[in-house]
Image: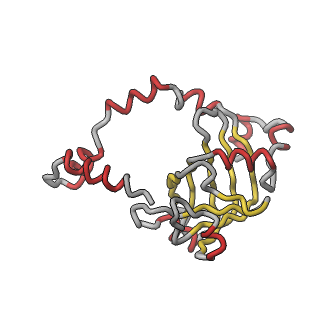
Amino acid sequence: MAEVRARLGEPEAMIQAKLLDHVDRHARRFIAHSPFLTLATADAAGRADCSPRGDYPGFVKVLDERTLALPDRTGNKIADSFRNIAENDGVGLLFFVPGMRETLRVNGSAFVTDEPDVLARMRTEAKEPMLAIVVEVEQVYFHCGRALIRSRLWDPASQALAGELPSAGEIVSDQLGMDIDPAQFEQLLEAGYRKLY
């Protein structure tokens, strides 16, 4: 790290000052408008995993200035995040708001809950999640927009690149080495996506 610091230098005092230990009103508002985040976890050996999470804006609830809760919606049931949290409670969340260059980072420790009062706060389409992840906040800060500016993530012209990739059906058929009709697989995916809740 000393060699890294020798090359990069130290962060400015203003950057250090923006690292908060709680969810202030600006972070709370950003979270209320965010429909998407990434959740980083690691197992006991330090092997990392990063999982996408999304729902209607505000799907993550601020229980208080030091506690967040995010619902576990229907997914692939692999449960990597749950397994990791059981072994190592450290987590990192990166919140996005479509069209905004800045992101919000939240770091802390987490546990899984089925507490009815917590789950009831995350009811959507008249259905509650079966489980939720509660995050005890240790660090909160807004990350500058350089990465999103460089990536042109919100630029519609950049989104056209998706058309150059194979479909999910083609990828699965190839990876599994099975004679799966990609079009049929796409139809199954679409049917699953229509049953998000």
Q: Residue 98 in the image: x percent, y percent?
A: 58, 37
Establish if 107 lies above or below 27: below
> Residue 16 placed where, x, y %?
82, 43
Give the vertical position of 145 relative to 76 (above or below): above
Image coords of residue 149 (percent x, y): 60, 27
Name the residue nearer the viewer: 194 or 166: 194
**Residue 104, quarter of the rendered image:** top right
- Residue at 64%, 65% in the rendered image: 121
Residue furthest toward the left? 179
Check the image and tell me how it is coloured.
secondary structure
Please say if 151 is above or below 23: above
Q: Closer to the camera, 100 or 109? A: 100
In the displayed structure image, the side of residue 172 where residue 17 appears, left or right: right
Residue placed furthest toward the bottom? 115
State the residue at coordinates (52%, 51%): 54
Depth check, front residue: 159 or 140: 159
Q: Is residue 110 visible?
A: yes
Which residue sits furthest front?
126
- In the rendered structure, the answer to whether residue 116 lies left or right of residue 185 reads right
